[in-house]
């Protein structure tokens, strides 16, 4: 619940900052932080600067908020934020569900009319906004001549925030080895995205070590937290290797959210 409320608060804060100007905003940024607890704003605000700190200091911070539906899984939450409707209206109530007509479990981004548009790799997914029943804020902006760009680690995040179209809608593939889009948004790879990805390849980090940015004394809790269970190939403490035999993280738990 709190991760969705935190995201909604960030969106609201952005809106307040944008509308505070005398003229209509030329840019709207919607930032959704999945699984971010509401108390993290107070806990980490002293570590923030620029954008995030400005949201807290100059924007609206809603400390008492509620949602009138059960599931705050990623797909349902992102669709609610982007459309302003609830799951029984926008149709996205979970990350996946059983489709009686097809006798199969389908993801919330299942779209049989779409095909994958991969960047530098092959792809055969049928991913798009076909399950989303109502227009998003981005859809309304496009009707008024606006341009829409979304990107996320997951297809369900990028797609639900975009809605039924967009100039550039991109996400990391399910195989975690490259970026892709869908024919629901573009018939071919977008030149600017392709150029950026070529200049900043994912495998450039292979062989590096993931370490903490700040000194150990700057962190409020111990590195090896209570109940912490490392994913396959990692220990429960930093540093973490980013490539090597047996070091690929097991993302199965993360993927369900």
Image (tube, rainbow, N blue to C red):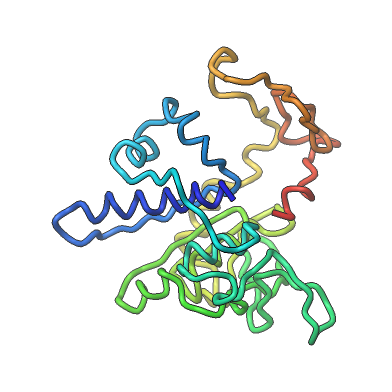
Q: As rendered, which of 146 and 236 lies closer to the eye?
A: 236
Identify which residue is drawn at 53% across, 58% down: 67
- The percent position of residue 12, horizontal first and vertical second, equals 37, 53
> Residue pushed farthest top?
217
Q: Quadrant of residue 128?
A: bottom right
> Residue pushed farthest bottom?
101
Identify which residue is drawn at 56% across, 47% down: 3
- The percent position of residue 35, horizontal first and vertical second, equals 60, 46
Q: Quadrant of residue 96?
A: bottom right
Vertical side of 183 occupied by 227: above or below: above
Vertical side of 107 occupied by 120: above or below: above
In the image, 138: left or right of 216? left
In the image, 208: left or right of 181? right
Identify which residue is drawn at 59% across, 47% down: 201
In the image, 34: left or right of 142? right
> Residue pushed farthest left?
22
In the image, 41: left or right of 110? left
Quadrant assignment for the C terminus: bottom right
Vertical side of 107 occupied by 250: above or below: above
- The percent position of residue 131, horizontal first and vertical second, equals 62, 77
Identify which residue is drawn at 52% across, 59% down: 194
- The percent position of residue 92, horizontal first and vertical second, equals 62, 71
Q: As rendered, which of 56 and 1 lies closer to the eye?
A: 1
Q: As rendered, which of 94 and 217 lies closer to the eye?
A: 94
> How many numbered circles are shown?
0
């Amino acid at each position: 619940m709190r991760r969705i409320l935190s995201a909604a608060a960030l969106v609201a804060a952005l809106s307040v900052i944008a509308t505070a100007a005398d003229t209509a905003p030329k840019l709207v940024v919607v930032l959704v932080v999945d699984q971010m607890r509401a108390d993290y704003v107070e806990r980490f605000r002293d570590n923030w600067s620029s954008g995030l700190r400005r949201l807290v200091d100059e924007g609206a911070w809603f400390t008492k908020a509620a949602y009138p539906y059960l599931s705050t899984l990623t797909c349902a939450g992102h669709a609610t934020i982007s459309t302003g409707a609830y799951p029984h209206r926008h149709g996205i109530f979970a990350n996946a569900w059983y489709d009686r007509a097809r006798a199969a479990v389908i993801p919330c981004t299942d779209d049989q009319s779409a095909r994958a548009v991969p960047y530098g790799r092959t792809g055969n997914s049928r991913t798009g906004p076909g399950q989303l029943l109502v227009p998003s804020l981005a859809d309304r902006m496009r009707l008024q001549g606006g341009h829409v760009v979304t990107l996320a680690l997951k297809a369900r995040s990028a797609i639900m925030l975009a809605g039924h179209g967009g100039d550039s809608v991109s996400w990391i593939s399910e195989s975690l080895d490259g970026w892709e889009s869908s024919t629901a948004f573009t018939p071919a790879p977008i030149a600017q995205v392709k150029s950026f990805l070529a200049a900043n390849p994912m495998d450039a980090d292979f062989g590096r070590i993931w370490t903490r940015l700040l000194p150990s004394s700057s962190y409020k809790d111990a590195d090896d937290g209570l109940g912490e269970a490392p994913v396959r190939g990692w220990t429960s403490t930093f540093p973490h290797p980013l490539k090597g035999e047996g070091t690929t993280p097991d993302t199965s738990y993360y993927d369900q959210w």
